[in-house]
Amino acid sequence: MSSTKVLYTATATVVGGREGHAKSSDGVLDLQLVVPKELGGPGGAGSNPEQLFAAGYAACFEGAMRFVARQKNVTMSKDSSVTAHVGIGPREPTGFGIAVKLDVNLPGLDRAVAQELIDTAHRDICPYSHATRGNVDVQITLV
């Protein structure tokens, strides 16, 4: 039984898998999916699940840090950013797995304060961090 009280549900439908089309129920997200050349596909104009996951995790993680900053009366710069790198490859014994690296830029903050925001967001707040914990190698670097 989940302990999550759902406040919002995003819905998207994909037709054609990694070489298909993705569209959200409200039509805001509407894009082609293309297999990257690195995975044996044609590459080109289109996105892929790893890019979408990277964008989602980066946005969610920065939002989680801003939440923590507000709780601690810390002002984060509007120029703060999170860059997510999501890699995919074969895993043992079968299938595929992902690995995540988050590069966090918190200009103007003392490194110790910045690291505390990162640690608290990752440990306690960010739902992507909760979902990946124990399943995905996530490395976070304060740049």
Image (spheres, helix red, strand yellow):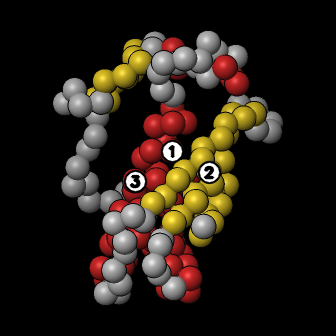
Q: Which residue is mark 3?
A: 59
Q: Which residue is mark 1?
A: 54
Of the image marks 2 and 3, the number of the one nearer the N terminus: 3
Residue 100, numbered circle: 2
Helix, strand or loop at label 1? It is helix
Position of residue 126 relative to residue 91, above or below, is below
Q: CA distance from mark 1 to mark 3?
A: 8 Å
The quadrant of the picture occupied by the N terminus is bottom left
Furthest-right residue in this view: 93
Q: Are marks 1 and 2 in contact (CB under 8 Å)?
A: yes
Q: Position of residue 65 (x, y in %)?
A: 41, 70
Q: Position of residue 34 (x, y in %)?
A: 52, 18
Q: Position of residue 18 (x, y in %)?
A: 52, 20
* Residue in the image at 56% along x and 86% along y: 112
* Residue in the image at 65% along x and 41% along y: 87
Question: What amino acid type should be assigned to the residue bearing mark 2?
Answer: Val
* Residue in the image at 48% along x and 18% along y: 45
